[in-house]
Amino acid sequence: MMAVQAKKNPMPTQPPEVRAHNFEEVATGYTREIALAEAQRCLNCKHAPCISGCPVNINIPGFIGKMKDGDFAGAVQIILQSSSLPAVCGRVCPQETQCEAKCTMGIKFEPVAIGRLERYAADWYLSQPAQTISTDPSNGRKVAIVGSGPSGLTCAGDLARLGYSVTVYEALHRAGGVLVYGIPEFRLPKSIVAQGIETLRRQGVNFETNVIIGKTLTVDELFEKGFDAVYIASGAGLPMFTGIPGESLNGVYSANEFLTRANLMQAYRENPVTPIMKGGKVAVIGGGNVAMDAARTALRLGAKQVNIVYRRSMEELPARREEVEHATEEGIIFNLLTAPIEILGFNDETDARNPKNGFVTGMRCQRMELGEPDAGGRRRPIPIPDSSFVLEADTVILAIGTTPNPLIKNTTEGLEVNKRGGIIVNDAGLTSRENVYAGGDAVTGTATVITAMGAGKRAAKAIDAQLRTQ
């Protein structure tokens, strides 16, 4: 009997000293040999607890079993039954807290690297000649999808396969939503997203960009255009701020704005033309994945020093461990148990850009210690008296979360939302309006890609069930 390999096969990556200065993908992916070796670690459990950890319920033992036999085509077909974007999920999903957290191997050893295997299978599939995608015959029904992020794309793909005529409306000039404008190139190449969207086009999904639902068209006007149902997957693009003094200074960005500029203005290309500052010192407020993305993007855009400022300890830091490790290797400085209390600046009356607001010179911070747990179960940060200090910075990026944009809520009569602006839905994703569904970050606020995809799948199933009865 062959001995069990206790540890995952490591993911090959660019050396930190090299990747910190380019936007090429950090993780270079498994080779065929590594993928086959990792697949052999799967125990093919009878009860498959890993499936319950996947928000879209991929048959994980099924696709890994195919990979063990070298049948990558078969593996991909199993994945595609549940996920429209496996190459995306294999890169950005937090498998360590989802499917891999329930892996039986993880009881005694490291869990199977499910995400890395999914990525390998998906990349293999994308390297093959484009295949014909089978869909059900047209049923004559039309569905509008608002937003082309992971939730909208998933819902669109599932409905197209069922014979619906699907049109996806995107506010920006390129389809992909947060996958394109929010996640940096070094974590998720734009070409991967483009291939996923092209697959949906081949399924018959239509995409209309530069259309802002709530402004260019309203939800009511979509029904007037003949759509039988609408799925709102507009995300959570409204940034949150701290309210500390100095947030209006020049050189202060929300992470949403900073990453959108970097991505849509193609700052990841050589010699880009973009107004984002290069050089100097950058301070990023926050500790989630978006904070890591903003910090690592700033470094690649030429920042001499990048500081993460987070008011709790490393143990409470919400970002993925892999992203934190990569950021640390690349030289990002973590100022933990530290809270910003004021952004500092000076006025330059000779500068014609905006002399009234001034320009960032630094940030006054306060040392913290952890007290008793708050209502959410996390230990509450408490200021340490007489511990303030000034952190030098030319740019400050706030990465403390986002909320849904109120535009659709304000232009759609009878659409109920909660106090944070999230659209209220039932378990099937149905809103307070007949035949109007919603899901993803527009409902929950900022969450993961795979969680949004799960909402898209549930909504597609509910829309199909409802329209077949009408």
Image (cartoon, rainbow, N blue to C red):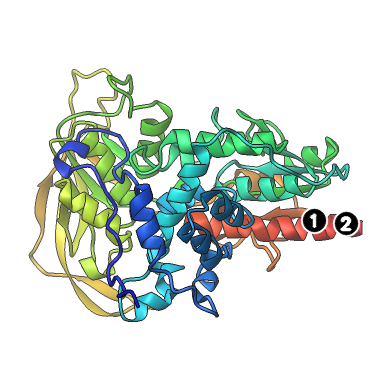
Q: Residues within 10 Å of mark 2 (few under 14, many from 20)?
A: few
Q: Nearer the viewer, residue 339 or 176?
A: 176
For the N terminus, which image quadrant?
bottom left
Q: Secondary structure at mark 2?
A: helix
Tell me the number on the disc at residue 464: 1
**Residue 287, quarter of picture:** bottom left
Kind of residue at badge 1? Asp
- Residue at 60 percent across and 34 percent down: it is 130
Residue 64: percent from the left, percent from the top? 49, 62
The image shows residue 374 at horizontal and vertical percentages of 34, 77
Question: At which x and y percent is residue 14?
Answer: 23, 42
State the mark number for residue 468: 2
153 horizontally vs 315: left or right: right
Q: Is residue 263 left or right of residue 310?
A: right
| Depth check, front residue: 119 or 282 | 119
Can you say whether 405 is above or below 348 in the image?
Answer: below
Q: Are marks 2 and 1 in contact (CB under 8 Å)?
A: yes
Q: Position of residue 248 (x, y in %)?
A: 31, 39
Under mark 2, the amino acid is: Arg
Say which residue appears at 15% left-offset and 40% top-offset: 393
Residue at image coords 51%, 57%: 450
Q: Quadrant of residue 51?
A: bottom right
Give the class, few, some or many, for how many residues have Cα within 10 Å of label 1's Cα (few <14, many ≥20): some
